[in-house]
Image (tube, coloured by chain):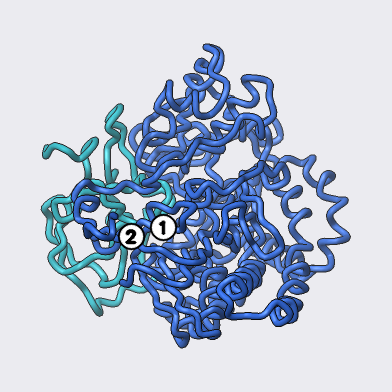
Chain colours: A cyan, B blue
Amino acid sequence: MFKRLDNSTQGRVNVTINGQPVQVPEGETVAAVVLVLDLPYTRTTPVSGAPRAPFCLMGVCYECLMVIDGKANQRACMEQVREGMRIECQQGTGGSRS
Amino acid sequence: MKQHYQLAVIGAGPAGLAAATLAAERGVEVAVFDEQAAPGGQIYRAMESIPQHRAGQLGDEYQRGRKMVSAFRASRAKYFSETQVWSLNGRRELGLVRHQQAHMVTADQVVIASGAMERPVPFPGWTLPGVMNAGAGQILFKAHGIVPDDGVVLAGSGPLLLLLAWQYLHAGVGVKALLDVTPMMNHLHALPGLPRALLAGHYITKGLGYKRDLKRAGISTLHNVRSLRAQGKDTLQSVSFLHNGREQKLETSVLLVHFGVIPHTQLSRVAGCRHVWSDSQLCWRPVLDEWGRSSVDGILIAGDGGGIGGARSAEHAGRLAAMQALYELGAMASDAQQRLARNDRKWMREELHIRPFLEAFFRISDDMLQVTDDDTVVCRCEEVNAGQIRAAVADGHRDSNQVKFLTRCGMGPCQGRQCGEAVSHIVAVASGKAVQDIGHYRERPPVNPLTLGQLAGLHPEEAE
């Protein structure tokens, strides 16, 4: 879906996405990382369970809510990746682990 | 972080940077609170970290931000990045959260420089993964050098859409089609604004240049597109629309949409500032005087958050607001203020020449604003569709707030940012009233979700 114009391997950090280890560029937001990895969705809605993905990337739409380091409802577009970060798709309200 | 500042500036885009830099230069104690990791706002995003070649691809308007950001960095303004403002009231108390820790701060003067956001226009399928705002595409490009795979479709109306197509062209991205939903009649309606717009003719020259480059590159641009629909099961697979009365369909995994920009008014509304409906800009905007003073004492609003004027105009508005704050703080005499304001006023007026033309030319059709399709989701958070909103009106609910109470529309995590404008339009049409009589959602703190832990972690004195 999305690609990096420059694929230099400088400044990488190790994160896990839905449990899978991945090396990603330092300084990128979580939303940018998951868009390039082409995840089919980043959360499901609490009402109907519909899949959703990042929409505005500037913090106003709250579509990109994910579970980051065990904390639910984090805006993936406002969080930069850090070494060891655990990133998970959020199911519904993120209140229960599934 | 201290508990009190003479001046608090919210936002580090052109208006906020200009206001903070000027005020700090005059010896006032300024704190700038901004959500992003680095200064520049959305327009000059990633200014300090962008590689030179990519900055070049973004065009020369972007380069303007470099000077602003470095002047701000050189000033004595205290800068708090990654800081959300979740509350602001008439006593100029700001509720903040930074690195998961909540704070309360007060200020003698406040400049809200919250900027703009893309106008959310609900259409069938706009919630599918793969459909994003054009601004989001531009942020990925600016901040991370990330672009869509070949075959991306761009749709909507407004200068940003054209600019993004041009930027993608220069980055070697294959744009499948540019779908222009601007109604043909707009050309006629925009004509009276043209003579004044020609006074800011460089913008028109630039826009025509982008169009020419896109045409030469063979990018298919379809005008007068109607009935835009995004389709797919769990993710975007195609885009359908009517073009010259003919049904068409394009396969794509990414659709970037843009329907103009509107002021981000969450904070000015929660603070109780008076707002009016702007029919030309199709949005709510705060009522401001020539310095940017709102109806609430000590709260000034500068830049696109006070009405859309663009980045350069925001810079001047930021300085004018700072001058007024300096005057109120006793740091600038009235005659000095008037003298200093003269050039900014003049340049700001020149910047605004283009606006009436742009507003009429790129005005979104009533069909799209009013979300005529009942099944289209309007509130993305609570999944309330246009039919449910119309049913609520038919049931006797006659303004945005009543509809909100009945349907939960606007009660999700985004706090109505994405559905507020559309609900105003839908309720107005369904109840046969004007949009300004419908009103906007009443705003209450916190305007951003906050955890109980963060609230409980407020220092006792800070929380009073």
Q: Nearer the viewer, residue B349 or A90?
A: B349
The correct choice, above or below, for A8 with respect to B299 in the image is below
> Who's the residue at 63% across and 26% down the image?
B428
Give the image location of residue B208, x and y in percent: 74, 63
Chain label for disc 1: B
Chain label for disc 2: B
Mark 2 lies on residue: B104
Q: Is B287 situated left or right of B63 in this image?
A: right
Residue type at mark 2?
A: Met
CB contact under 8 Å: marks 1 and 2: yes
Mark 1 lies on residue: B93
Give the image location of residue B420, x and y in percent: 51, 37
> Who's the residue at 34% across and 59% down the image?
B96
How far is mark 1 from mark 2, CA to CA? 7 Å
Q: Nearer the viewer, residue B395 or B297?
A: B297
Q: Residues within 10 Å of mark 2 (few under 14, many from 20)?
A: many
Q: Residues within 10 Å of mark 1 (few under 14, many from 20)?
A: some
Q: Is residue B16 visible?
A: yes
The correct choice, above or below, for B183 with respect to B286 in the image is above
